[in-house]
Every structure is written in structure tokens, then in C-alpha cells.
Image (tube, helix red, strand yellow):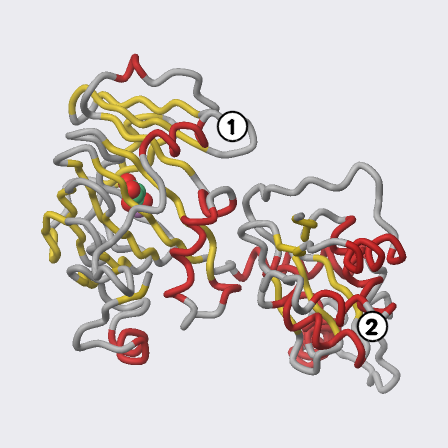
Amino acid sequence: MIINWGELTPQRFLSEYWQKKPLLIKKGMVDEFEHQFIDPLDANELAGLAMEEEIQSRIISHKNESDWSVEHGPFEHFDQYGEQDWTLLVQATNNWSAETNELLKPFNFIPSWRLDDVMVSFSTPGGGVGAHLDQYDVFIIQGEGKRHWQVALPDDSLVNLLPHPDLKQVSEITPVIDVITESGDILYIPPNHAHKGTAIENSLNYSVGFQAPSAQELWSAFADKLLDQDLATARFADPNRQPTKNPNVMSDADKQALKQFMLKELDNEAVFNDFVSSYLTKNHHQLDIVEPEDEITPQQLSKLVEQQLVSIEPVLGLKSHLNQDKTKVYINGDSFELCPKTQFLAIHLANNEPLHPEILPSLTACLKNNQLLTRVINMGYWYILD
Ligand code: SIN
Ligand code: CO
């Protein structure tokens, strides 16, 4: 799939719309060859995913504007919900469906650490989650069916409603986009822009959602790292202290010195880089990780690659990242030290590029590569496909 930007370009989109204003791109997501949107899954496959324990799913239904119910998966049956006024939402569908994961590719003009997941919804006529605000940027792609979407600008007069303890909605919105979306249409919605989608026909929607950590989350996770690794244990020092006339007042100079003392830890480039790379490659959702029952050794791996045509592939939805000086690769929050010999392999790992039989023997001929590969395989991040 590609994004058919029309008059726009990724560059123009970022400067004019990203985090600023909502946008509708008619027929924005199309197949390169057929020039139409092809659903990566169907409603039955989505229902199948909602039956799985490790996949987060919800069914939201309503009888009227004030009587809403929310049920959490896994689900066994769907017949009881009838033909209208309900929607099934499945989080991080891209971690389980390779075709859905492909929907992320056209968004690679935004770095992968900013991405969160592809949430897929199936809605019957009248179905939706009601008017609400999200804190994150989202591109909602219309698949099969049609849906009435309304998007409003930020509005302080909106009242928060809680028609069900698990359902945050807002009072009636004044839309600046009011449209019936059809297959392939993309709706971009920045954070804090209220929106509401109501299905007209049985409808599939793909929400490509982004993440933006709060400063609170970052500080808290950074403090956790300092504690876990027993870093920043030095004590505040003040060898040049002068006598004070006001012992019960904390001077501005002391406050500044304390602030600088704390900020010095953030200025430690090695620690900070390691922290952000680990923290932001950690997936928020369950991955399809199956650690091998018996760990494979580097020797076994090189023998296997010599004797059989195998590929080594990453699990879906894996977030990986190579640091700028190519000394470490980060995979789902774990870091792996590199040496000059493993840098080429690390580029494949960071890009989640499957290792095919044409390239594998030359890689596994090197012990260092073998050791790195066996580690990521034994941790379940990459797996052997024969
Ligand atoms: C959907 O109903 O498909 C998307 C829900 C949302 O707007 O967050
Ligand atoms: Co939303």
C-alpha cells in the first residue's frame, strides 16, 4: 500500500497538518498496482483475534445516546450482539497479522519510535464509540463499508461524559470535517480533536496510532533506570559554601546548584541515549513471542544454516533501533552490544529485515554474528522459519 498524497507531500503534511489540524485524504491509501484499498483482513479474522487471551479487545454497544455498554475480550461468541449499534475494537492487530502490519510502511516518513499500533475496528450500522478525544495522533483508514465521521477543533466548552465507567465521551461536537468515508479514505486526527465515527454499513476501520511519552512517564522511567543500574549515587557537594544569615531560607543559588546537580545526570549522553532507546523501543502491547523450548547454540545455528534453506524472521510489530555510532542495537527495550563485525547484521535487525537463505550463510560464518543471532532467537524476538 502507498499513500496517494495528491497535492500534498509528507513534508507539506508535516509542516501544515501534523499535530496542528485534521485532514481528510480521499482515496488516500491505495494498492500500488490496483489503485484501490485492499483490506488486510476481514471481519471474521478480526473476530478470531478477539477470541485470543493475549490480544486486547472490546465490544462497545449502545441502545440509545445515553445507554452504553462495554465488554472486554477475549470473546467466545458474537451472535448475541445482533445486527446493529455495536463495534468490536482490537488493539495492536499489526502484532498478529502480517498484512495489517504492512499498513505501517507508508508511514515510515515518521520515525518508528513515534508509532504505537494499528487498532482495527469492525462496526455494524449505528456502531461507534461515540464522540471522544484521544491524546495521540491517529490516521484512521476506512476499509470495507462506509462510516460517517465527524472531527472537531479543540474546544474548551466540551463537557466530559462517562456513560459507562470504561467509556470516556464528550458532549456534542461542532465538526469541521463531516464526511462519509469510503474504502481507502484516510482521516488524520491530531491529539485533542474530538471525533465521532458512526457506521453506515458493516465497516472496517484501521487506526494507525502514534505514541508521545509524557514528561512524567519519561522522568519516572529515567529514575527507574538510575535505581536499577545503581547510577547517580554521588552526593550533593558544596565545598565553597559561605556563611548564611538566614539558615532557614534555601537560597536561589542553592536551588540552582541542586537543579544543576540533578540535570547533570540527564546530560550524561551515554546514559540518556541508552535510556531513550530502550524505553521507546519497548512495545506497549503483547508481541507474539515464543521463546524456543531448547535454547539454540551458535554452533547449532551455523550448522542449521549450512545444511538447510532457512530464513530468520522478526516477530511482527517488533520495535528495533540502531544507535547513531552503531555500537548498540535495541530490540523491544533490550540492548545488544555490537562490534565492527556485527554492524552489518545489526542494520538488518534494526530494520526488521528478514534474513533469507541467500544472505544467511555469509552472516553465520562469523562467530560474533552467530552469537548475536542466537541471543535474539533465544529471547524469542526473531525465529527460524524452515
Ligand atoms: C474506530 O472506531 O474505529 C476508531 C475509534 C477512535 O476514534 O478512536
Ligand atoms: Co479516537
Residue at the disc numbered 1: 52
> Residue, x 32% and y 38% (percent of image)?
121
Percent across and percent down for residue 243 are 82, 82
Element on which disc 2 rests: loop
Is residue 164 rendered to the left or right of residue 321?
Answer: left
Percent across and percent down for residue 44 are 35, 29
Residue most toward the top? Answer: 80
Q: Is residue 246 visible?
A: no
Is residue 279 rendered to the left or right of residue 33?
Answer: right
User: In the picture, residue 12 is in which quadrant?
Assistant: bottom left
When the figure is inspected, residue 98 is found, relative to residue 319, above or below; the finding is above
- 106 or 176: nearer the eye? 106
Kind of residue indicated by mark 2: Phe
Q: Indicate if the residue with disc 1 has its beta carbon within 8 Å of ligand 1.
A: no
> Residue, x 27% and y 38% (percent of image)?
169
User: In the picture, residue 344 is in which quadrant?
Assistant: bottom right
> Residue, x 16% and y 22% (percent of image)?
64
- 342 or 14: nearer the eye? 342
- 242 or 291: nearer the eye? 291
Element on which disc 1 rests: loop
In which quadrant is the N terminus drawn? bottom left
**Can you tell which mark lies on residue 82?**
none
Residue at the disc numbered 2: 236
